[in-house]
Amino acid sequence: MASGCLGGLFAFTSAALAQYAAAKPNNVGSDIELDEKYQNTHRIDSLNILLYTFLLILTVITIWVFKYRRARYIHETGLAVIYGLIVGCLLRYCGDNTQLSHLTVTANAAVNGSDDLPPDTLWLKYSRENLSKNKTYLYGYKGEIPETGANEIVQKATFDPEIFFNILLPPIIFNAGYALKRRNFFKNLGAIFTFAFIGTVISSFIVGSLVYGFMTLIQATPQLSFIDALVFGSLISATDPVTILAIFHDLHVDVNLYALIFGESVLNDAVAIVLSSAVENYGSGDFETWAFFSAILNFLWIFSMSFLIGSVMGCLTAILTKFTRLRDFPLLETGLFVLMSYSTFLMAEAADLTGIVAVLFCGICQAHYTYNNLSNESRVATKSLFELLNFLSENFIFSYIGVSMFTFEHHVWSWGLIFIAIVGIIVGRLLNIYPLSLILNIGRSPKIPANFMHMLFFSGLRGIIMF
């Protein structure tokens, strides 16, 4: 009886749906197709996230095997890049060939009075004879397209740069400040600031000048301007010797050498980003003295104000945790700590400063002041949380570097540029470390010995900021 009633209900429902579809075939069909399009987009997004998740899982398992076997000949970040290269190659040449549909739209009028810039959004009025009513669809600005007919999965494997700067980078930089060995860091602060500030500027100008001179000499196409070469030199001067520091940690090397290399790598990431922004703001015109000093003042302004925001937010968090009873509620205490730290980055970016500098010094202040006010549960939670986020973010980025070698469509190979960039990096590092070390030794105790200089020179590996 029950099955008969259910069968009748199913038949009635099916008939009703069929009648409704027959009455409005066009609108319903269109809505169903759009829903399928959304579902397909969601499926591909999930597939790409799953891909990177599996890459991280594979990296973690391999790291465990290497640690268990005490293998030291390759670092975890190198593994992440290798796995990413393999997956990127498979996506590029063995993946699904599903093509993205596209409609070419030609602008016939200026956008807000400007013929140079594309619009922020595009309203596409879509009308067809088989639709009972016209519809308007909203498309957002995503940047220059790689090519028409691009593979959908390959294109989506290349994520938005905003994800890198706003989500992945902040925990890496914050953890660098929060996990800092403060005693040795501040003991060598003068040398660290010298290498991070003056050394990075020296390296940037040497690399930029060599690249510009070489590309002009061989008359390469497209030709780089001097400003473009300086921006390139600034970004490529950011060091990230994670492999060397990991080996140093295992071998228990001299604490001063570790502090010098670590401190330089922590600070010059921020210096490289701020310096490249200052050079870009300088413009592409002829050399002018006032514009040059304006760029220097702009650099100092951005760095100092970002430092101020980070320090104030760190001290404010310390005051809140000291004079309230938040320590009685570790979950709320940890939540406030994380939110205050992350808001530092966003606050600096919203003020057109650099969130990298702000969140770095926020991490240092949080470690120096706030950490002592936290409950034991929150101390363990914050340390573990940011170590985890740092580990996952770094390995995700290095995996993405490997994948993007094959999925990123804008690669332009210039073997001359690659060669002179490598030469410039070596020469810039050479003229950075040795002269500055000799100058520092005039008034420094203990002195920087020659073997420390050699290690500082060989520790100039490039990392994620350069990418």
Image (spheres, rainbow, N blue to C red):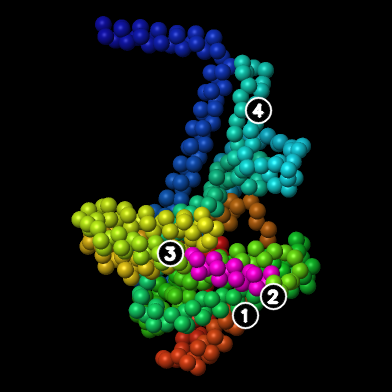
* Nearer-N-terminus badge (3/2): 2
Give the residue type that dot 4 points to.
Answer: Lys
* Nearer-N-terminus badge (2/1): 2
Q: Position of residue 284 (x, y in %)?
A: 72, 64
Helix, strand or loop for disc 1: helix
Circle 3 is placed at which residue position?
Answer: 310
> Do callouts 1 and 3 mark residues in contact (Cβ within 8 Å)?
no
User: Which residue occupies the extreme bottom position in the image?
Assistant: 442
Helix, strand or loop for disc 2: helix
Q: Which is in the foreground here, disc 4 or disc 3?
A: 3
The Cα–Cα distance between marks 1 and 3, rounded to whole angstroms, is 34 Å
User: Which residue occupies the extreme left position in the image?
Assistant: 328
Circle 1 is placed at which residue position?
Answer: 427
Give the residue type that dot 1 points to.
Answer: Val
Left or right position of 297 against 342 = right
The crowding category of the residue bearing disc 1, from other C-alpha atoms within 10 Å (few below 14, some 14 to 19, many at least 20), is some
* Nearer-N-terminus badge (4/3): 4
* Nearer-N-terminus badge (1/3): 3
**What is the magenta range?**
291-306
Q: Position of residue 169 (x, y in %)?
A: 47, 59
Does 440 appear in magenta? no
- Quadrant of image for the C terminus: bottom right
Magenta stretch, overall SS: helix
Circle 4 is placed at which residue position?
Answer: 125
